[in-house]
Image: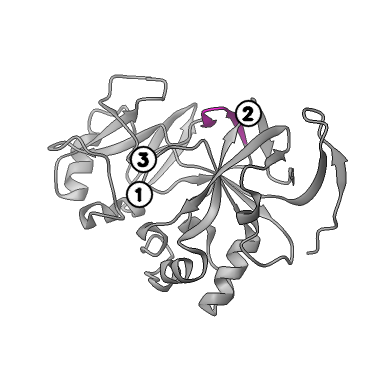
């Protein structure tokens, strides 16, 4: 699919706009480090996608959050999935089909059995507290929006000599379809202003990748060459982090302008 160039004028800045793509996927990860859910639309505010990465898992003995990319004990987290089934309180799904809402008093015991050490659910300090949970801080600097293009995925697939690479390996908030364009497109957008549907974004940083990119998860095998190629050919970066400048709703199919 080819995307034709389209120009307009931003109502907020008065600057010319160029169409670069449209939203192919929107993702929400209610619990950090575990699988998330693809959603057709999302409410956004300056703190991020509503319901995204508000909770995490901790090692009870240390109080530290899960780190699958650093500690092999946490790697089974990639086979869990969190979804906002009813309202905003997530439910955690296990590979055996069991499911527990985060406020279920049995959940921490089930998690501890699953990981093989004392594990508990916690909430990040910037999130609204819905019930009494331990507070944790992000291990890395937190950005409200992680954006990735199909152009970057196509370039990486070429380097891997495969037909396609699944976006789930990189956990973007939004995947942008850029048509037949190939290359690390978003690298050239540093400090630029974007308009995603009704949302204004400012590009802040390139996304530095870690071992999570090649680890196995449902229907995806271990692929160490993914991170090696990102390191060799793009200085360990793939995708961008953005700040969100206003409040609104985005939908799959919304256009991205720069």
Vertical relation: 103 (above or below) 30: above
Name the image quarter holding the C terminus.
top right
Q: Position of residue 222 (x, y in %)?
A: 37, 69
Q: Which residues, given as a range, are shown in magenta? A: 42-48
In the picture as drawn, the residue positioned furthest to the bottom comes out as 161
How far is disc 3 from disc 2 in space, using C-alphas?
31 Å
Residue corresponding to mark 3: 92
Residue corresponding to mark 2: 245
Pick the residue in front: 51 or 11: 11
Q: Earlier in the sequence, mark 1 or mark 2?
A: 1
Please name the residue shown 65% across and 26% down the image: 246
79 left or right, relative to 5: left
Q: Secondary structure at mark 1?
A: loop
Number of marks in picture: 3
Residue corresponding to mark 1: 80
Q: Are marks 3 and 1 in contact (CB under 8 Å)?
A: yes
Q: Position of residue 256 (x, y in %)?
A: 73, 45
């Amino acid at each position: 699919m080819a995307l034709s160039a389209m120009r307009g004028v931003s109502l907020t800045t008065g600057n010319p706009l160029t169409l670069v793509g449209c939203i192919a996927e929107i993702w929400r990860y209610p619990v950090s480090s575990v699988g998330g859910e693809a959603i057709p639309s999302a409410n956004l505010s300056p703190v991020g996608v509503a319901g995204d990465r508000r909770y995490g898992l901790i090692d009870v003995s240390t109080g530290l959050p899960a780190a699958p990319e650093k500690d092999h004990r946490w790697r089974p987290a990639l086979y869990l999935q969190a979804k906002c089934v009813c309202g905003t309180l997530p439910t955690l799904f296990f590979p055996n089909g069991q499911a527990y809402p985060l406020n279920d008093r049995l959940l921490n015991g089930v998690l501890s059995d699953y990981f093989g050490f004392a594990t508990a659910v916690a909430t990040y300090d910037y999130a609204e507290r819905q019930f009494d949970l331990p507070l944790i801080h992000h291990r890395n600097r937190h950005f409200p929006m992680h954006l990735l293009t199909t152009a970057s995925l196509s370039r990486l697939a070429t380097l891997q000599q495969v037909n396609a690479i699944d976006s789930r390996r990189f956990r973007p908030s939004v995947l942008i379809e850029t048509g037949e364009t190939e290359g690390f497109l978003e690298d050239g957008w540093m400090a630029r202003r974007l308009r995603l549907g009704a949302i204004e974004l400012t590009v802040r940083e390139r996304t530095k990748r870690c071992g999570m990119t090649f680890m196995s998860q449902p229907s995806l095998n271990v692929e160490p060459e993914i991170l090696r190629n990102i390191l060799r050919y793009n200085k360990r970066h793939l995708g961008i982090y953005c700040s969100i400048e206003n409040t609104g709703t985005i939908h799959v199919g919304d256009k991205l302008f720069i």
